[in-house]
Image (cartoon, rainbow, N blue to C red):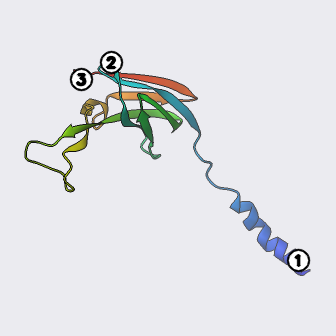
Amino acid sequence: MRFAAYLFFLLPWYVLAGCGPTPPVTHVVTGTITFDGEPVADGEIKFIPQDKVRGLDAGPIKGGKFSVAVKDGKHTVAITGGKMTPFPPGKKGLHGETEMMRNFIPEKYNEHSELTAEVAGPKELNFELKSK
């Protein structure tokens, strides 16, 4: 009798524990990124959902190539690229560095990105970015 009572009260909790929102479907998006004809050696690519409901997906760019798991849907794509540049004459970093990493990709490809992509399955995307 006691076992039947536990079963009666606990079984619904076990069933409900397995229920809940299903995780979003993701697909692997790969590709290449060049800037003025040269591969972006070191950077980051972000896929920002245009519905603004889900979080963004991002990954590194190495040697002009990327591979990121991206959720289904329409996205704004933001790309940054880092390049070591010298400090102005007479200036140094906090630890005496003479160079610092700076983004060399124009804002129209990151902060004010004009790039978009729709993801509904595995996809290859290639971006040829230009300075002008």
| Res. 37 image quadrant | top left
Query: In the picture shown, does residue 89 fall above or below 31?
Result: below
Q: Are marks 3 and 1 in contact (CB under 8 Å)?
A: no
61 with respect to 1 (left or right): left
Amino acid at circle 2: Gly
User: Label 1: which residue?
Assistant: 3
| Res. 50 image quadrant | top left
User: Label 2: which residue?
Assistant: 37
Residue 114 picture location, percent across and down: 32, 28
2 or 1: mark nearer the eye: 2
Query: In the picture shown, does residue 124 fall above or below 90?
Result: above
Mark 3 vs mark 1, CA separation in Å: 72 Å
Tag 1, which secondary structure? helix
Name the N-terminal-most of marks 2 and 3: 2
Name the N-terminal-most of marks 2 and 1: 1
Dot 3 alpha-carbon crowd within 10 angstroms: few under 14, some 14 to 19, many 20 or more? few
Residue 50 visible, this orientation: no
Residue located at (79% from left, 67% from top): 11
Q: Say which of 95 and 36 sits in front.
A: 95
Mark 2 vs mark 3, CA separation in Å: 10 Å
2 with respect to 106 (left or right): right
Name the N-terminal-most of marks 3 and 1: 1
104 with respect to 57 (left or right): left
User: Label 3: which residue?
Assistant: 131
Residue located at (44% from left, 41% from top): 58
Question: Which circle marks residue 56 in the picture?
Answer: none
Query: In the picture shown, does residue 21 fall above or below 76?
Result: below
Tag 2, which secondary structure? loop
Point out the image quarter for the C terminus. Answer: top left
Amino acid at circle 1: Phe
